[in-house]
Amino acid sequence: MEGHEVKASKKPAAVEAKPITFTRADPVALAAFDPRSKLCTMNCGPHAQDPRTEAECRFLCPECVEEWNQ
């Protein structure tokens, strides 16, 4: 089309990613925790860089329901 210029789009400046800090559970409290005592209601998946076990995530999660099988 005549009279219309195509402008090159500007790329946004690269932003350096900050490392994610994952909350960790107290090892003694986690050892005493039974993962079967909490039911996951959110179906959250772990982040690729999350070093925590499923039990530790369930222990720390405020969305998991406690005493669901009582």
Image (cartoon, helix red, strand yellow):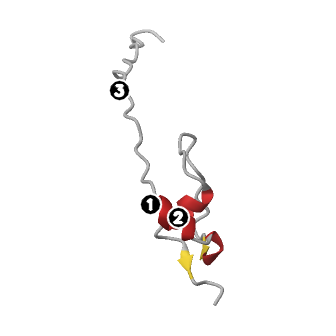
Residue sitting at x 39%, y 11%: 5
Q: CB under 8 Å between callouts 3 and 2?
A: no
Q: Is residue 27 above or below residue 22?
A: below
Q: Secondary structure at mark 2?
A: helix
The residue nearer to you, when weighing 56 against 50, is: 56
- Name the residue that disc number 1 marks: 26
- Name the residue that disc number 2 marks: 30
Nearer-N-terminus badge (3/2) = 3
- The CA span between labels 3 and 1 is 34 Å
CA neighbours of label 3 inside 10 A, class few (<14), some (14 to 19), many (20+)? few
Q: Residue placed farthest to the bottom in the image?
A: 70
The residue nearer to you, when weighing 11 against 51, is: 51
Q: Quadrant of the C terminus?
A: bottom right
- Name the residue that disc number 3 marks: 15
Amino acid type indicated by mark 1 = Asp
- Residue 10 visible, this orientation: yes
- Residue 60 visible, this orientation: no
Q: Is residue 16 above or below residue 64?
A: above
On the rendered structure, is 22 left or right of 12?
right
